Amino acid sequence: MSDREPSGESWDTPDDLAERVAATSPEDADARAESLRAGLADYQLEDDDLALLDAGETGAAEDTPSGPDPVVAIVGRPNVGKSTLVNRILGRREAVVEDNPGVTRDRVSYKAEWNGRPFTVVDTGGWESSAKGMAQRVAGQAEIAAELADAVVLVVDALVGITASDEGIVRMLRRTKKPVILAANKVDDERGELDAAALWSLGLGEPHPVSGMHGRGVADLLDITLETLPAVSAVAGDYEIGGPRRVALLGRPNVGKSSMLNKLVGSARVIVDDVAGTTRDPVDELVQLGGRQWRFVDTAGIRRRAHQASGADFYAALRTQTALEKAEVAVVLIDASETLSEQDTRILSTVIEAGRALVIAYNKWDLMEDERRHYLEREIEKDLVQMTWAPRVNVSAKTGWHADKLVPAMDTALESWDRRISTGRFNAFLGELVAAHPHPLRGGKQPRILFGTQASNRPPKFVLFTTGFLDPGYRRFIVRRLREAFGFAGTPVELTMRIREKRSKR
């Protein structure tokens, strides 16, 4: 969907909003914010509302990120119900589920939350279809998944009982020295708990009976699992504050990522081949660029679907996701000689969902003829209409042409990613915006914005306290005008609402 709102609205009428906000003195802005903040006392606020407001006033809300969310890997042999359990944990149908192994799925990791605590779930199975050497391969895959996780949930089919594959996975998991929680799946009633008890013999401690299909026992499993997790992931690690900024080099297979890294490094650091998918593991490399060091991570090309490749490619995609979680800015390479593909769009969306700064680099631009470049510019503007905020650089990974232009683009994106707006300035912006472009009436009512604050940066996240639901189109309008007033080029911006009612008078 385009950023543009319906033409019937007056939201896109040019005005001097940015100038009016800039002309507001800090003293006037702070005074207005204090008045609005005091007015919230008339509304029913929760404890976390007050904590957010206090943090916003002190500027202490996540100026320095605490680190990535902890990671839980769901492992086990094919067709034991891992994806069903993942969907139950997520509370939505996102992992694809079928009765046979070898199922297609678009992603291997998902953002989840339990009792207010965020974490990442990695679904690792149900895709290995070959029965030959099954136990060995599944155990090896479980080991890789466990290495990339803070804790592991091993799912075993309680109705089938322990198999040779289950025992092989257990042996491999013990070598990783990661916490392992044993989930006895397909226990739909009390009679099934007797089957689950037989899994004590695996030597992993108490088997926890669950039913991924019906949800039985999943809450208890999550409680136990979260007790084993650290506050932040010990695998992905924190951002390197004060050190080289971390750059993830992303793109579909054979788009030129390894060639670009080699050109930046000045040597053949990474294997380059015309065969797509040469890179398997992310390669960290310190690169001197623009007079300072950057830490680049070259990642395996993200394929259209994980099942189209071997197990190694499936986990290459998992490692790529991990590299993105560790990065601060992502440079996404797109082949200028081809039309924007669904793969390209999905990779760009992955970066935005991960909340990373973004730079788009069109590779092989030097090979384009002048006439073709003219039409290509128009095509790009149309294709990337939802991402006009992302800096774009035209480069050649093979020759290094315009590679130096990556530095100002990354600097711009990272500066926006780090940016924090004072509560006073943000509410001055909201006041001017709503006065000029009020929310349209819906059903005879007009929701009001009571107060706003920036909850965090990296990426910038804003929270609005409102009297009612704001239309998605109006929220997009606020974000677009927020970018116009304060920049935020090259970073996702998140805007959420907290609808609060007035206190009843006694």
Image (cartoon, helix red, strand yellow):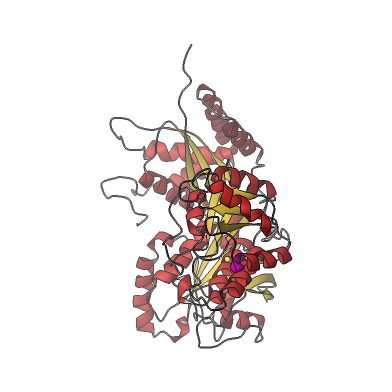
Residue 287 vs 173, above or below: the answer is: below
Q: Residue furthest top?
A: 506
- Residue 164 in the magenta stretch? The answer is yes
Which of these two is toward me, 413 or 203?
203
Where is residue 302 shown, x and y percent of the image? 50, 72
Where is residue 457 shown, x and y percent of the image? 60, 50
Residue 172 vs 489, above or below: the answer is: below
Q: Is residue 391 left or right of residue 55?
A: left
The residue stretch that appears in magenta: 160-166
> Measuring 39% from the left and 39% from the top, which residue is drawn there?
470
Q: Residue furthest left?
A: 8
Residue 248: name its quadrant: bottom right
Which of these two is toward me, 176 or 365?
176
Residue 265: name its quadrant: bottom right
Q: Is residue 323 visible?
A: no
Quadrant assignment for the N terminus: bottom left
- Residue 414 in the magenta stretch? The answer is no
Residue 408 vs 339, above or below: the answer is: above
> Measuring 66% from the left and 83% from the top, which residue is drawn there?
269
> Measuring 57% from the left and 44% from the top, which residue is drawn there?
114
